[in-house]
Image (cartoon, rainbow, N blue to C red):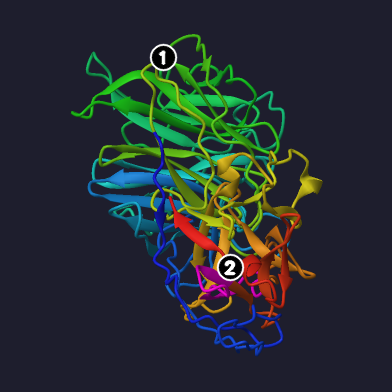
Amino acid sequence: MQKKYLRSIIALTMAATMLGGCGSSEPDNSNDSNEEEELKLEDIVVEKSQYSNPVAGFDADGKVTYGGDPAALVDGDTVYLYTGHDTAATEQYVIPEYQCYSTKDMINWTYEGVVLTMKDVTWADNNSAWASQVAKYGDKYYLYFCSWDSTSEGKQSIGVAVSDSPTGPFKDIGEPLVRGTFTTEESSGWNDIDPTIWIETDDQGVEHRYLMWGNGKLFICELNEDMISVKDTTGDGKIVYREDVRELRAPESFTEAPWLYRRRDENGKCYGPYYVFYAQGWRERMSYARTDSFDGLVFWEPGDILMNPSVTSNTNHPSVIDFKGKTYFIYHNGSVDGGSGFRRVACIEEITFNDDGTIDYIQESAAGIAGTVSVIKNNDGDAISHVKFINSSADNAYPYMNVEVGIGKSEDELDAEWVIVQGKADKSNENYVSIISNNKAGLYLTESDGKIVLAQNANGKLTEQQTFKTLKGLNGEGVTFESIVTPGQYITCGEDGSLTLTDGSDRDACSFVIETK
């Protein structure tokens, strides 16, 4: 469908004046005078995106709070989102607890606090609150999680904690639900991670409570009605590996992070195949596969890659829910200042199913499901873009710190989409903005040695370089972006299409027009 462009609300007129020291104006032939007129700079406010990714990443005081491996639960008119709290100062996992957010519209989120602290789980490591999922059954809530297990030769195990409320506190049952030593012939000590659960009643009226998990290998079992024990499917009075707990042939290129899902009709009845969304390869891509049944041999129909590796995180983790008639894909990246694959935040995109049950590629975005996407054009009407690139699979390519940006850098219109947000250096100043690439979420227009490039604030020290003041266009139209690091220097479009900082002598080259998509 053709997109219509609307102009942002920006004043487009000003007096024919000039900034002293920034060049000379045309002579006033009517007065036969060559006197320069001084330009009066005028602050303006441009439209900013009010709702954008990430949707979480803050605490009760609004301070940045990292959290990865998002897992969502729909409970009536509310969605609860659980993440492991990333607290590492260096590139390693330090995750001491699980935290919760809630929303009634998928846009406005409330921090609900910590729901389970790993120091209260006697068998687990205090700083390893790895991926989880919460399910409601009856009038109780069950948090399935994984952690390093001191009772299972130090391997990872699957645990479960119970609460009367979706916002906790959750209490661990005192021992692992599935020990890492139970699933033998493991390929690593972390095969038993990333639990996902699906509850449904089949056409014969039989209820199934499927629990799936795995890294490298993929396991599945059914749970008893107590939700805290594995079902004895053989009826021999004991839980048997490969019978009650089975290893499945994993989907194509399966790495980790399975998420079970099935479509429901308007009456809530499940139909169609089972979907397993999962992380694939390294750096991790998002993918999916389908199967008609978990009985007997399981044959997967592979799907396409859903999302390429994030531009700011080495891992990813899917969560898929239906809410108020729409389906949402929730994932994580490192797009907040100081973020990485070890300091992550949750993001959301909407997805739809094709008639044949396939799913189209999902673009990681800064705008998310409700943000404002903008196009920034120069005085000649040409759009600013960044060079087109596919996020690398090599860890040493990160963080991206010097991506070329300017006029004509890409023919792909996605590379010319921007999300303008409140300036990071001072969020109380309405004249400040920061500008994010929409399809490279977490990369900002950044001042770097007199040039403008696209970069991630991975070390948290580029906040001011990624903040600009908005002025009425120096040529009397549109908007001019002034550096707050070096006042009196303005983003300028050079003859070669590059963006640099200059003193504003060329007024047209310093003036831009913002259009919203």
The residue identified by callout 1 is: 293
Vertical side of 311 occupied by 263: above or below: above
In this view, the residue in front, 414 or 337, is 414
Vertical side of 293 occupied by 434: above or below: below
Residue 212: % across, % down: 49, 29
> Residue drawn at (28%, 54%), measured in percent from left and top?
104
Provide the secondary structure element on which disc 1 rests. loop
> Residue drawn at (67%, 40%), measured in percent from left and top?
155
Residue 117: % across, % down: 50, 60
The magenta region covers 463-480
Q: CA distance from mark 2 to mark 1?
A: 60 Å
In this view, the residue in front, 21 or 359, is 21
- Membership of 495 in magenta stretch: no
Residue 171: % across, % down: 41, 54
Q: In the figure, is residue 368 to the left or right of 163?
A: right
Three-letter code, disc 2: Ser
